[in-house]
Image (cartoon, rainbow, N blue to C red):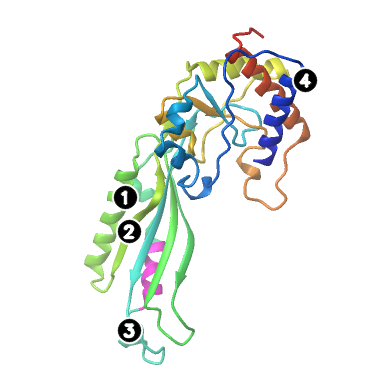
Amino acid sequence: MKGALASVLGAFKAIRDQRVKIPGTLTWVLLSDGEHGDQNGAAELAGRGILKNIGGDMVLYTESTSNNIIRSFKGRIFFEVKVRGRSVHVSVPEKGINAIEKMARIVETFKAELLGAAPHPFLGPCTLTFSTIQGGSAVNVVGGRCSGTFDVRMVPGQTSAGVLETLRGVIAEMKKEDPELDASLDIIPHGAREVTEVGENEPVVRLMEKVVPAVRGRPNKFLPGIESPGALRLFIDNGTPGIFFGPGEFISEAHLPNERVPVQNLIDAAGMFATAARAVCGHEPF
């Protein structure tokens, strides 16, 4: 994301240094808290009506796309599952209920295949991945509580409400087989983002299809939004269509040690942002 910031600054500097007059309004919105549902970033701006007031013809959401367009996105749900057991001394485990062992069965049972979604030809398969587990209180005590989080990436045809209903049904069936299972499942607050697609004929898509080869010399390559639409969904919901478009390498570089962005990507992105701004705000051909 620092690479995207650098490219946007480069675009603004180029427009200023070339004394380009833009009769329209070019707005830069810097957001935070994207990893936790945007509640202290874009969601706050949306709740205050700021995103709607900003308006605009289009938005370039500068996620990492290797300077290509992403207009179709998987949905995303952050889930938390909690299991309650009964703590006893480990020397008499039969007198307790081990919440960690119960959680292990849930982890083993919960698979993406349960959600009944066929792989999408462009976005790929639905996925379900456990990410954190916490449980127990001491090495010599049977774990009386255990909680875990997992992530579901949805494909077209799925909704967060439908996935929640299905997985709660799985837990209900598990409870019939194991009356000692005391488990609950909920979506983490602000943790659901629905499947999103921006139409191929939207002006922002058509614009960047022209801008990319004009600056880079190679055509755009449409990439699948295998992450989620992020805060872009909030812009769309507030009346501004947009796409993912930024200089960072595609998702393969995200959240890895030593994240990096090719220098040429930064230079190209700055040129693309400036060209797009002049075309839209100034109604200039290119």
SS at circle 1: helix
Picture quadrant where residue 197 is located: top left
Tell me which label, 4 or 3, sits earlier in the chain. Answer: 4
- Please name which of the two marks, 4 or 3, marks the residue nearer to the observer: 4
Indicate whether residue 202 is drawn in magenta. no
Locate the N terminus by quadrant. Answer: top right
Asked if the residue under mark 1 is in contact with the one under mark 3, i.e. CB atoms within 8 Å, the reply is no
Task: Compare marks 1 and 4 and give the one earlier in the sequence.
Answer: 4
Q: Are marks 2 and 1 in contact (CB under 8 Å)?
A: yes
Residue 152 rendering spot, x and y as whole percentages:
43, 48
User: Which numbered disc, 3 or 2, marks the residue closer to the eye?
Assistant: 2
Residue at image mark 2: 185
Q: Which residues are magenta?
A: 98-107
Position of residue 178 measured from the top left corner of the image (x, y, whole percent): 26, 70
Compute the Cα span from label 1 to label 4: 53 Å
Q: Quadrant of the C terminus?
A: top right
Give the mark nearest the N terminus, 3 or 2: 3
Relative height, residue 227 to residue 178 (above, below): above
Q: Any mark on residue 96, and which?
A: 3
Q: Is residue 197 visible?
A: no
Q: Which residue is mark 4?
A: 17
Asked if labels 4 and 1 touch by Cβ distance under 8 angstroms, the answer is no
Look at the image and say whether residue 106 sits in the magenta stretch. Answer: yes
Between marks 3 and 2, how big is the CA–CA gap? 22 Å
